[in-house]
Image (tube, rainbow, N blue to C red):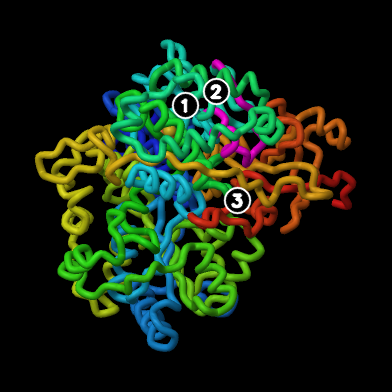
Amino acid sequence: RLAAPPIESVTETVCGYCGVGCRLEVSTAQVKNTQTQNTQTQVVQISGVSDAAVNHGHLCVKGRYAHAYHHSPDRLTQPLKRVGQEFQPISWQEAIALIASKLLQIKAESGQDALGAFTSSRSTNEAAYLLQKLFRSIIGTNNVDCCARVCHSSTAMALQIVTGTGAATASYEDIEKAKCIVIAGANPTEGHPIVGARIKQAVLNGAKLVIIDPRHIELADYADVHLQLLSATNVPLFNAIAKIIIAENLIDQDYLRERVEGFDEFCNFVQNLALDEVAAITSVAPELIRKAAQIIGDAGTALFVSGLGLSELTQGVSSVITYCNLGMLTGSIGQSGAGMLPLRGQNNVQGNADMGGMPNQFTGYQPLNSPEVRNHLAKLWGSLPSETAGLTIPEMLDGAATGKIRALWVQGEDIAQSDPNEHHVRAALANLDFLVVQELFLSETAKYAHVVLPAAAFLEQEGTFTNGERRIQHVRPAVAPPFDARPDWMAIRDIAIAMGANWQYATPSAVMEEIAKVAPHLFGGVSYSRLTNDGLQWPCSTADHQGTSTVHKQGFIRGKGKLVSIDYIPSPEHGIADYPFLLITGRVLEHYNVGTMTRRTPNQVLVSEDLLEIHPFDAHQQGISDRQPVKIQSRWGEIVVKAKLSRKMALGTLFLTFHYPETHTNFLTGPHLDPQSRCPQYKAIAVRLQTELNL
Ligand code: SF4
């Protein structure tokens, strides 16, 4: 047995996987490469920072063990240029000149709106800010969007409608303070494991727990009641709970009178709901709906946790608004130990949207058409785009498919694997005149690129991430990027300069200084010198502001909070003849999204393929045995995967992950979008199964 190499250095930083944002202590040592026999500095151990506000010293199987990808031999280490069907290594100088000239050429030929950018939720705030600034101030388009579009855009829009700001109103510390925790459409023990562990502990300490989920997730074992609804029927279920809370006088009358508008209208609306009809739509028995309402109401206030099971639906915005109605009725929003806590998927998806990675808002959610905002930004940015919102990701991909969008810049997202209707996404990417991709690996999306820029991983760069509770934390490099890979912000700066901009940022800290000036209402008090230990939660508007744990404490940002009456519109994937099953797509604990990183770590040994979860009764009816290959067909495509018999599933419901590119899970997902947020439907897809295969 070899002795462990001596630890060379220990660096404090922030986990680059999920939106929980755990603080890490990263130990490095000199390790011999068994192939080249050279020694190099590698990460050899990661542990949690013991006094971290987010993780209290704990880490999950991703944060603690899944770091080996950073020294994978597959890493991109030089810029690549497409030559025919091949890639050729080129220098940074050549890559920068090529990208700058090609973007300017396409703008000159087809106008600024023929170009677009997808900023990355895995990259730093500084990199996301600079990319949207490049497209807005140099190219002159608002065609800037981020992966929040395909995950929590519905949540952000709903929260903005009812409270005035599109982010969590509560913090993770509210988990321990809550008398009642409601979890809808989220599976924290797999997707956000440290939050899941904190919820378990809170329940063991006496908090009530209500689970609303089509699957029997692990936390359902801890719950006082589990409403196992049919996927995409959240709206009538939440309306029914609201009706009972009102009927049983479990509302917070003072709060509603003083802080909320729309109560009388809402009462009239829910009066007409029939519980039996809701039960028939949702598959949840009336007595369970009553029990959940009573538990929430009896607690006085509750912490309403949510996930993509609400957001990634054609009724995504409606689902989250009707969930927020429960928070308003019980007076929970703006209170300690209560409020709305959507669990954000990627490490910096919150920050990415905050930085302006959205087509309809500038940095800090500032409106495009406010004269005051435009005057302010013009002084800082020089040139500004029009007041008209740009295109969302699905719209830019539609534009690429038809030739209206000619150039895209994709920063660290693997949309060819992660976005819905994969056939359409791949056709759109293949139709582009120019695609720039910043990536760690030659991902499915990078394979379509004309220029690929090798990026630095989170362990290799400085910057900031903003977690799901609006906490901005300092990310520090533990090791250097491999060979010629570079942090995204640096590459964007250099390309902007090559396009004629006078960008003088020497460090990410200088970028943050500008962000604080651009959106002082949220970030005015944020600077690297203040981001020690647990960082700062925005809003943090001045240098002496301590940050905000609970938003809307004194009043809502929009003035009064809003109760909204919303009718149920059935999902376009419900009740489709010949497609009797409803498929939900999602994640497992061991892997992170498209698996680009975790598949190159020891986690690969724990889970090495995507599996279709099916209830044993359904499997028996279909003649399917465990690990048997099954063809899944939707109206949009078909794939073959192995079945996994699981009693977690409700009858008629299936679950499938999308961690492996060879599975092509998103061949099955279709074109349906929420009409307001443009968030796709991943959580309810009508499918049928076929077992007799000629493999
Ligand atoms: Fe990283 Fe999320 Fe796990 Fe924390 S819970 S260690 S942030 S993956």
Looking at the image, which residue is at 31% across and 55% down?
365
Judged by depth in the image, the label closer to the viewer, 1 or 3, is 3
Closest to the observer, 634 or 388: 388
Q: CA distance from mark 2 to mark 3?
A: 24 Å
Q: Position of residue 602 (x, y in %)?
A: 53, 37
The verdict on label 3 being within 8 Å of ligand 1 is no
The quarter holding residue 670 reads bottom right
The magenta segment: 224-241
How packed is label 1: few (under 14 Cα within 10 Å), some, or many (20 or more)? some
Q: Position of residue 67 (x, y in %)?
A: 44, 41
Looking at the image, which residue is at 46% across and 39% down?
265
Circle 2 residue: 219
- Which mark, residue 196? 1
Please say whether residue 503 is visible from this viewpoint: no
Relative placement, left or right, of 675 versus 476 is: right
Please say whether residue 254 is visible from this viewpoint: yes
Looking at the image, which residue is at 80% across and 43% down?
580
Q: CA distance from mark 1 to mark 3?
A: 25 Å
For mark 3, give the secondary structure. Answer: loop
